[in-house]
Image (spheres, rainbow, N blue to C red):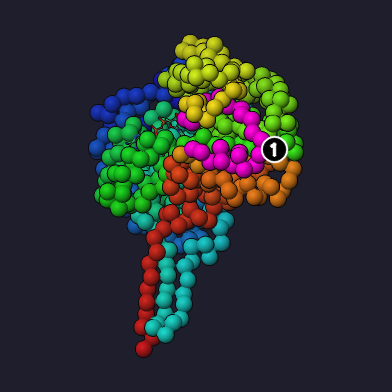
Amino acid sequence: MYPHQPEGSHFVEGAYRDDREGTPFQSCFPADGRVIARLHVATPAILDHAIHSAQNAQAIWRTTSLSERQQVLRRVAEILRDRNDELARLETFDTGKPISETLVSDPASAAECFEYYSALSPTALQGSTEQTDTGTIKVLKEPLGVCVGIGAWNYPIQIAGWKAAPALLCGNAMIFKPSETTPLSALKLAEIIAEAGAPAGLFNVVQGDGKVGQWLVEHPGVAKVSLTGSVATGKKIHAAATAQLKHVSLELGGKSPLIVFDDADLEAAVEGAAAGNFYSSGQICSNCTRIYVQRSAFDRFLELFIARAESMKMGDPLDPETEIGPLVSEHHAESVRTYIELGLSEGATCVSGGPNSVSMAADGTYVRPTIFTDVREAMRIAREEIFGPVACVMMFDTEEEVIGRANATELGLAAGIYTGDNGRAERVAHQLQAGICWINTYNEYPIAMPFGGYKQSGLGRENGLLVLDHYTQTKSILTQSR
Ligand code: TXE
């Protein structure tokens, strides 16, 4: 028996299920490669069961009152909080992220999301009524039906929670497919949603790779797909879903700029830059991997940033002191190492970390925080999402120049500005092509704040009130007054 073996690979219609006909796969602890669970990819029988039970559950749930739905969501938040430590530990084993992070970030963020939607005023979904000369117009927000959530491996339970909570609030059912790299915590969320009183089948979890995801996207019984993943996968899912005119939301990658003006609190800016490059070993889509520092502050910023990076304790993710854990897999560590070598061959200067700080396999998949200077925007390390602890620090002179350089990318998820001048911060934020702008902070995600990108970083938004539009459709009813 493996230490985190679930009772079954899937959670469908209120219970763990398995079908040994499915292709076997495993989940490993990235710190030492140890197998922690063995599972099976969902077979057509499991997938059909997931679809039918979700349809049946949604038929009940859509007529359940909003306040009853909110009670279930509130209970989910409570159970997530009660089981926080156990879920954080599981997330650390599945992803390799340090326990110091998972204890405060992962199930906690999912809980915050369920709590936020459980506490929303009913007016958020109420629609409107208007008397006109023609008659009474009622505009209703109705659920879409069965929605599919597809997750990435970096924040498994948070991603599942961010998709499930608003989808369920709006009266939908959801079938969630976690990343095949991190299959475990979504099963726990399904268990908790069932325990909180949701009808069996309302939130099903099925396992598998992109083929299972594609099967779900193409199924005629599915009304909407919400993905967190890479740009390449986003394009495939968008094409498949829109071919059937399905609703789609996409949370994709980023190569976000952080702009540090010379009047900024440099210590705060360094903290923001460290959080936005090295937290979760850099495996965060909204990271600020292009850091622009104004000329007169450049040397001081770099000195502090290097010192901060080199002070971070790397090691066993289960040690509460550890700040840098392993990357999620050997395959991914290899990709990050290739990018570091590419940066050197492109002519950038590595001032901290580097390719020799990468260890693989028996040592775990660790990469030390790595900082490049002498970076030009044409270099691939400055253009492509590396998704590891690799930062590029560049110099700028004027506000106008840095806005142009910051926007010169096909991606547009996030941006950060550090300055002591509030007027300038606002002015620059308005000109940045990014779905999220942080001023004098970085990578903070209150649930009330819509999250999502411009350009190729995605479509639609998660969180906030705005996401309700992405999980509902509008029905207009006109009643003749004569
Ligand atoms: O993502 P994929 P991966 C980025 C980051 C990373 C890269 C690869 O750059 O290096 O993506 O990560 C499912 N139809 N991000 O391999 O391949 C797949 O099974 C339906 C950014 O995890 O995009 C998984 O569940 N589904 C990201 C999910 O899509 C398909 C966080 C994501 O897989 C599918 C993580 C298909 N055709 C990685 N193909 C962020 N935005 O935060 C794959 N999938």
Residue on which the image places disc 1:
261
- In the picture, measured across the screen, residue 80 lies left or right of residue 396, that is left
Q: Is residue 67 visible?
A: yes
Q: At x 58% / y 34%, what residue is drawn?
A: 288
- In the picture, measured across the screen, residue 154 lies left or right of residue 38, that is right
Q: Is residue 349 above or below residue 133?
A: above
Q: Is residue 115 magenta?
A: no
Q: At x 57% / y 45%, what residue is drawn?
A: 432
Please tell me how many numbered marks the rendered image carries. Answer: 1
Residue 253 location in percent, x, y?
A: 47, 36
Tell me which image quadrant ligand 1 sits in.
top left
Quarter of the rendering containing residue 349:
top right
Q: Is residue 396 magenta?
A: yes
Q: Is residue 51 visible?
A: no
Comparing 164 with 381, the one in front is 381
* Quadrant for the N terminus in the image: top left
Stretch in magenta: 383-409
Residue 287 location in percent, x, y?
A: 56, 34
Q: At x 56% / y 31%, what residue is drawn?
A: 289
Quarter of the rendering containing residue 5:
top left
